[in-house]
Image: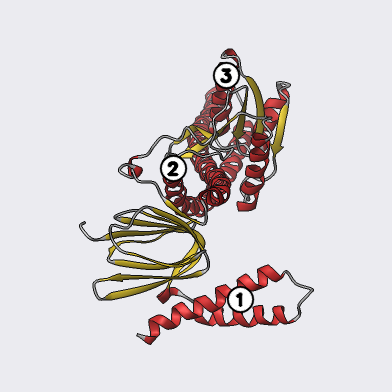
Amino acid sequence: MPTLRDIKRKINAVKNTKQITKAMKMVAAAKLRKSQTRMLEMRPYADKMNSVIASLSVDGESHHPLLIPRPRKIVEVIVMTSDRGLCGAFNSNILKTAAKFISERKQEGFNISVSVIGKKAFDYFKRRNVAMRESWVGLSGKMVYSDAQKIAINIIDNYINETLDEIFLIYNEFKTVMTQKVSIAKILPLASIEKSEETTGLLTSFIYEPSREDILNQFLPKNIEIQIYRAILESQASEEAARMTAMENATQNADEMISKLTLQYNKARQASITKELMDIVGGVEALK
Amino acid sequence: MENKLKLEIVTPYGLVFSDEVDEIVASGSEGEFGVLPNHIPFFTTLKIGILTYKKGNETGYFFVNWGYAEVGPDKVLILADSAEKSEYIDVQRAIEAKKRAEERLKQAEKIDHARATAALERAVTRTQVAEKKRAK
């Protein structure tokens, strides 16, 4: 039976925790609003870019290295997580999917190369002694377009040098504030982009100004940058949403715990008062 | 839908414009081009410049800062790094930017010439677009 003082101490501790989780929830909500608008603004651009790529890539032969499929040997998996924890299942979902994806590819006989974005993924693979080709950590929450550019340049170089034959990006896609979906996106090669509905009906080929190769040279790397940047924005919004939900739950749990403990505290207090009364009554009885 | 063009202008900062129009004139990297419905498929890069569209007897102007244009028989898709409608251009800011760029260009040698020229071009084009609207 814990004493009154023990219970009181416990209540205070839970109250402190609740204050922290509540504050974290509020911060996450504010950050979410910002990154969510940024992401929603970006979405149409990235989508349109994909549909343009789709219509360009079905339009005639191309000798552009980023469009030519080649036998796959080395598959790169880029795993995108956050740097910070306390965001529910956000990171563990990603890592679980990544681990499954990697082991499946290994069984199919591909060589796997792993790169990570975010400290949580870095720690995860380091703990498991998985060699990482490249890691970008300490950026989450403040990633800007030039970071996406750096990543894009890195993978394009490696793809052209044929050190990587296929590149996947695993990240959290923002669905709603309550749900995030783990998404596996193929970044390279581009040739396999499915023909989207919007591009149907264009049977005559395009006229290009300047030349087709010039345009592809500019446009393809740009598209990769944009797709990576979009994934970064999605992931950031998802992270804040996940954190907000997790902190909301934590605050609720704390509330529940406080009310339970308060009940226990009051019961114990009453029991002690009853006991004291009994003592007094007993004493009076004895004096008679 | 017949004899109409669906003009869509998309930037990394959102969908700027989406409507059915009759005619479009834009500045491509190889020169200005006009688009009427039933144009053959055409793909070009855009430089800093003015995009004009006509819808009935309404004419609108956009400032477009680099990008790509995909032209189909019944649609024009503009993917721009940034784009502003003439009404929303901050003329004061553009004029100041123009002054800054001109001053920097005078100092020669010490500066990133390409960057300053681009800044000047942007500022000048912005003011032009804004003026077009007012002149009407």
Provide residue A251's location: percent of width, then percent of height: 51, 40
Check the image and report above or below for B132 versus A84: below
Q: Which residue is mark 1?
A: B120
Residue type for callout 1: Leu
Check the image and report above or below for B117 versus A33: below
Residue A280 visible? The answer is no
User: A206 or A121, which is in the foreground?
Assistant: A206
In the rendered image, which quarter is residue A79 located in?
top right
In the rendered image, which quarter is residue A159 located in?
top right
Q: CA distance from mark 1 to mark 3?
A: 52 Å
| Residue found at x 65% / y 30% | A164
Sequence order check, earlier mark of 2 and 3:
3
- Residue lying farthest left? B2
**Residue B31: assigned label:** none
| Residue found at x 33% / y 40% | A197
Circle 3 SS class:
helix
Q: Which residue is mark 3?
A: A105
Q: Which residue is mark 2?
A: A177
Q: Quick check: do tags 1 and 3 share a chain?
A: no
Given contact means CB atoms under 8 Å apart, are the residues at marks 2 and 3 in contact? no
Near mark 1 (Cα within 10 A), the count class, few <14, some 14-19 or many ≥20, is many
Residue type for callout 3: Arg
Q: Which is closer to the viewer, label 2 or label 1?
A: 1
User: Which chain is mark 3 on?
Assistant: A
Q: Quick check: do tags 2 and 3 share a chain?
A: yes
